[in-house]
Amino acid sequence: MFVLGYLAIALEHPLHVDKAIPALAIGTLLWVLYIFGAYDIFTSGLSEAWNSYVHGSEGHGELGIQAMRHFIVDIEIIRHLGEISEILFFLLGAMTIVEVIDKHDGFKIITDKIKTLKKVKLLWILSFLTFFMSAALDNLTTTIVMVALLRKLIDDKETRWFFAAMVVLAANAGGAWSPIGDVTTIMLWIGGQVTTLSIIARVILPSLFTMIVPLALLSITMKGEVARPKIDAKEKIYTTPFERKLFLIMGVGGLLFVPVFKTITHLPPYLGMLLSLSVIWLVSEVQHKDKPDDIKKRLKVIYILQKVDTPTIFFFLGILSAVAALQSAGQLTVLASYLDEHLGNIFLIDMAIGVLSAVVDNVPLVAGAIGMYPIENAASMAAMTDPAAIEYASNFVQDGLFWEFLAYCAGTGGSILIIGSAAGVAAMGMEKIDFIWYMKRISLLALLGYVAGAGVYYLQALFLHH
């Protein structure tokens, strides 16, 4: 069912069916199959979630089909919905803030500073800008900001798709080496698997290569100049220079406030995003209260909200809900133990997780890896006698090779397919990028970058760790 839905998403353009439709279909139907097959799934012992629930519910009467249904409906769906909603509200807040900056012509201040029309030079400037912005904000917010910028810089759709694809690659690479740059790195950082300075020092170079290799290859094939969108001299300007500056500073400041909010309060990032939005919304209401109706209808947040891309939100909801069902029923655990059994080498396991994260969302894959491998400590390693076992276990200590390489692979592997990362999905929704087009033009470049970065990490580990 998941594979069929996935194919329908990939073939969105030939089928003329919006990708949100199959995503919502599998997001609901997988839960239907799960609840109908609950008895078989749970008695087979595959579902880790059910096993730990039963373990905690011993002595609470017969765990029959009613208990199984209660577990799926009242516990699992609610838990996953909580996690999914955090991402969706974060996305909704970020997209609204970016749309507010855009409608107030805030990005014009930045685009006016970028004078070059040469495709290659522009590609390098925007990619490096994305790479470092992504580490400070996070890859999803950065992609939304950069794609909004691209619309002001490039007129031709095909060229804009190439640039948007490189933005996705650069945002994912930039997010992998920063503890707040990507959801998966955040998970490893909060879980105590990696520490801030160590992840930055050891993953920044591989991440840089992931971006530079595709950039260098594209620089050989890309020629000519970009055409800027035509600016109509007669077009009415609705904002003053002061308003443009104000909303650009408030918007970018509001987005940068989110990681600070999270660090200070330890609350989820979406709350910081909604707080930023509320402040910007209030300022916009005060700023435009005495203006004529035609300006209000263009600049007030209540009207701007109607322009936010709702189908992308639904697409996210569907795909994350489908993956949550696979995770809850134990399919992803089966996959993870299969990798462990057949590969048995930490570098190969991480590489495989990275490639898989292009197909399945990287968040549950990393969650699965965290669940499968406990963090080793000095006490547990002291009890081991076999030198090979000690050597293998040393990869799983805090800041061990396994965790750092997992942050790199899960963060950058998603770029291989456009729906392999949150950044890719956002760009796809905003620019209507075709899945097959991305696969033909970008996937190989992204894969080469991914392998090059992995090679750099491996060499680094070889010479620096041992």
Image (tube, rainbow, N blue to C red):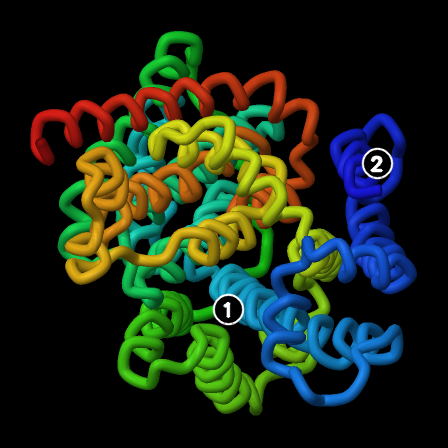
- Is 455 placed left or right of 451 in the picture? left
Residue type beneath disc 2: Leu
- Is 198 placed left or right of 69 in the picture? left
Residue 122 % position (x, y): 35, 29
Residue nearest the viewer, comparing 57 with 454: 57
Residue nearest the viewer, comparing 370 with 213: 370
Label 2, residues with CA under 10 Å away: few <14, some 14-19, many ≥20: few
Residue 284 % position (x, y): 51, 82
Which quadrant holds the N terminus?
Answer: top right
Mark 2 highlights which residue? 4
Measuring 35% from the left and 34% from the top, which residue is drawn there?
346
Which quadrant holds the C terminus?
Answer: top left
Residue 153 % position (x, y): 46, 38
Q: Mark 2 vs mark 1: which is more N-terminal?
A: 2
Tag 2 near tag 1, CB within 8 Å: no
Measuring 62% from the left and 36% from the top, which residue is drawn there?
359
Residue 231, quarter of the rendered image? top right
The circle drawn on residue 97 is: 1
On screen, 271 above or below 189? below
